[in-house]
Structures are given as C-alpha cells and as structure tokens.
Image: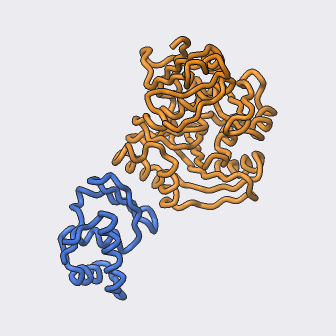
Amino acid sequence: MIYRAPPPSALLVEPLDAFTAVFHRPSGITHLLVPPAPQILAVLTEGLTREALMQRLAAEYDLADADPVALAARLEELVDAGLIRAE
Amino acid sequence: MRHRFDVRIGPAGFRVGSDWRAPVEQLAALYSDYPKPENGVPDFTVRLTAPRPWRRWLRPSVAIAGDYMLPEAAPLPLRHGLLAAEMAMNLQMALGWRRHLLLHASAVEKDGRALVMSGESGAGKSTLAALLATRGWRLMGDEFALVHPRTGDVHAFPRLVSLKNESVAAMAAEVGEARWGPLLAGTPKGDIRHLVPGPAAIAAMDTPARPMLLVFPRFGFAPAVRTVPPSEAFVRLTQASTNYTALAEDGFKALHRLVAEVPSVAIDYPDGAAALALIDELVP
C-alpha cells in the first residue's frame, strides 16, 4: 500500500511549540499535530510504502527507535483525519 | 418597523427596528454619543417583534429577528427589551461579521497596545475590562475583540458593557449613575445592567491597537498566573471565535500570527482588586 500526503500547496503548516498547526486547504479543517505526524506529512509528499516511509523517517529525522506498530497507528490516524491517502 | 434606531459601534453599523417605543428609546439614550452607520447604510438589521400579534400588548414579549437568527432563541418580556436588542446585535456580529477574526473576548488599550481577555461566561472579562477602564485603560470592548486578518491589529467594538449580578454593585462604586442603563432584574442571565463606555472609548473607537498580551481569566480562585503555550492559546481562541471556521485560511493565518507574536497567560483571581494587581504586575 502506498501512503500519500497532499502537495505542500494544499497545506499551511505552522509549528507552534510541541504542537504544529496545520490548515488543510481542500477541507478548510485545522489540525493540531505532534511528532511524528508533521514529519510524516513532509516525507509523504511523494507516495511511499510504510517500510520506505520508516526508512526515510529514520534517515531524515533521526528516529532511531522507530516502532513499526506505532507508525502504522499514526498512519491510520492521519488517513482517518483526511490528511493522507492510502492507495 | 414602527420605531427605529441606527448606530455604529466600531466598524459595524446596525439598524434596530422595534414594535415598541421603549427599547428604542433606551438604546437611543444609552448610545447618544455614538455615530450613525457610514453613509447611513447599516451592516446589520435587527428587529424586535412580538412573537404573536397580541403579544404587542398582552403580556408583551420580544422576539429577536434579523439578518442572522437562532431559531431556538426564546422571547423575552418587554421589560427586558434592551437586553433583547443587545443580544440581537451581538448575534449579528457573531454569525455575520467577516471583516475581522472575531474573538469572544474583552479588550482594553494603553499606549497603542491592547490587552485581550478571553474566557467563558462568568470568567469576568466584562468586569475586568470595565475596571481597567477606570484605571487609565481605554475600553475597546467587553464582548468581541476584532483581529484584522492582514495587519493583526485589534479593532474596537465598544458596545454597552453588560454587567451581571455582583459586578453591577462592584462597578456602581466606580462609575457615576449617568452612565448606567436600567436594572434588568431576573433575566435568563441574572440581573443585568448596561454601562455606557466612557467618552474616550467612544471617541477612539476607530483607532486599532497592537495586541500585547492575551489573558485567559478565571474568577473565583486564589490569585495565580500561568504561562499559556501558543498551542493552548490557539485552541482556546479557535473555540472563542465565532467566525474562525467561516474565515477559513484567513482565520488560520490571523490566529496563528496572534498566538505566535503575542504572549499568553491564564490568571486566576478571587476579586477585582486581585485581578488588577495581577495585571499591574504583568503589564507594568
């Protein structure tokens, strides 16, 4: 399965503190995200499998103890929130 | 409508029409120093009407109608007609205003910088704003703070200050009788009295201010101050805004800018004097 985030032009991303505020232009909905959700959105602008996403997050964001089960849960949440698509 | 009253409060022009003379006469007296809508054209129209024709005379009661309405709003007795008018005007702003991000908050200004106070009903934002207005601050509004989506400035909406229950007596000691409206006893919100903002607040109502501090007050607790992180302020203010969703991207940008640029604090206070002392410490 390929996971894909909207193109950068579809999102306004504003880091606040531990939270990042994201405005999703197509839906007009505001989301408040905590890591690794903003990083997932950034990496998934090109569609990736979960395994490929795991590698990219580990390489680019130093997620040494990345947990595949936790990542699957985060991806499911982002799909449910309408922020990424599973194809 | 048989009786009519026009007024401009900050950037918003209103026309109030009424089946009865009394509410319009009270509005005209209390808003006597306010300007009329720009070019005579109001932004909003409000109607105070009888829910049934016989209710104009027989146990008269006032239903609110206007450009924007809440279907479940219950009629008020005619003796509370002034409250009905104020509620109707607030409702038009809350549901219809689009030129600014509208925060359910009071605001006061000093030296061009604004203190914005947002809280649930009963948090004391009206009382605090009215108190600060007797201590050298300019009242910008007790109900809505208008944040300009481009500049980030706070614009004033200095309607009559609506004070409830114990706050009425507390403020009566501070402000002379001439600036008070009638006591509206036993309303759904308790005993209410409206206070006319001072001449300086009305004269300067077209002058915006830079927000300098966001305050989330809570009445009835021992004095305490807590720094509020931007994300918490962001969430609280999306909930305190009546038009955040309607403004879409402009609302997001305006609110993000506000919480990113302006520090936020939550304050607990047991009484007005303690609140004033806390604010004096925060804004020396």
| Left or right side of A62 for B200 | right
Measuring from the top left, give residue B254's x and y in whole percent.
41, 47
Q: Is residue A80 above or below residue B174?
A: below
Q: Is residue B273 above or below residue B228?
A: above
Q: Residue at point 26% right, 53% down?
A: A26
Q: Residue furthest top?
A: B2
Q: Residue at point 49% right, 36% down?
A: B71
Q: Residue furthest bottom?
A: A65
Q: Residue at point 63% right, 19% down?
A: B23
Measuring from the top left, give residue B133's x and y in whole percent.
68, 35
| Left or right side of B171 for A28 | left
Please tell me which residue lies in front, A9 or B121. B121
Q: How many numbered circles are shown?
A: 0
Q: Is residue B130 above or below residue A23?
A: above
Res. B28 visible in picture: no
Measuring from the top left, give residue B136's x and y in whole percent.
68, 35
| Left or right side of A39 for B48 | right
Measuring from the top left, give residue B174's x and y in whole percent.
78, 33
| Left or right side of B225 for A64 | left
Please tell me which residue lies in front, B97 or B157. B97
Q: Residue at point 60% right, 28% down?
A: B84
| Chain letter, orange in picture | B
Please tell me which residue lies in front, B111 or B137. B137
Res. A73 visible in picture: yes
Which picture quadrant has residue B81? top right
Which picture quadrant has residue B33? top right
Chain A shade: blue
